[in-house]
Image (cartoon, rainbow, N blue to C red):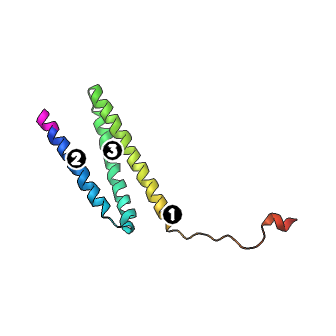
Amino acid sequence: MGNVLLQYATVLILTAFVGTEIIAKVPSILHTPLMSGSNAIHGVILVGSMLILGEANTNLQEVLGFLAVILATLNVVGGFVVTDRMLEMFKPKTQKPKGPKNEEVAQ
């Protein structure tokens, strides 16, 4: 059991380092399409975590499954919020009409 736990911890740490290095090298113009792709992946993770939670037998499994569902949900929602904000940057801004305001004209 201890050896397997050490292997899992090693994989987790290595994936954190590799993920950080990969994401740091992504140009900003590719960020929005990659976020959309990662949102789809996190949707699959959310479904998987709900399936795992449904099969939980012990209290520890239920707590970990619930935590996985919460974190996956936060990732999906946060990813869509970030993608929406980035897409807002590319929309043309409407210009306000020049001239007096309607209130000033009525007086």
Q: Position of residue 87 (x, y in %)?
A: 47, 64
Residue in the picture at 76% in, 73% down: 99
**Residue 13 shows which numbered tag?**
2
Q: Amino acid at mark 3?
A: Val
Magenta range is 1-5
Q: Is residue 66 above or below residue 97?
A: above
Alpha-carbon distance for marks 3 and 2? 24 Å
Q: Earlier in the sequence, mark 3 or mark 2?
A: 2
Q: Amino acid at mark 2?
A: Ile
* Residue behind mark 1: 88
**Residue 46 within the magenta-colored segment of the rendering:** no
Choose top left, top right, bottom left or bottom right for residue 23.
bottom left
**Residue 80 shows which numbered tag?**
none
Q: Position of residue 76 (x, y in %)?
A: 39, 49
* Residue behind mark 3: 47
Q: Secondary structure at mark 3?
A: helix
**Residue 4 within the magenta-colored segment of the rendering:** yes
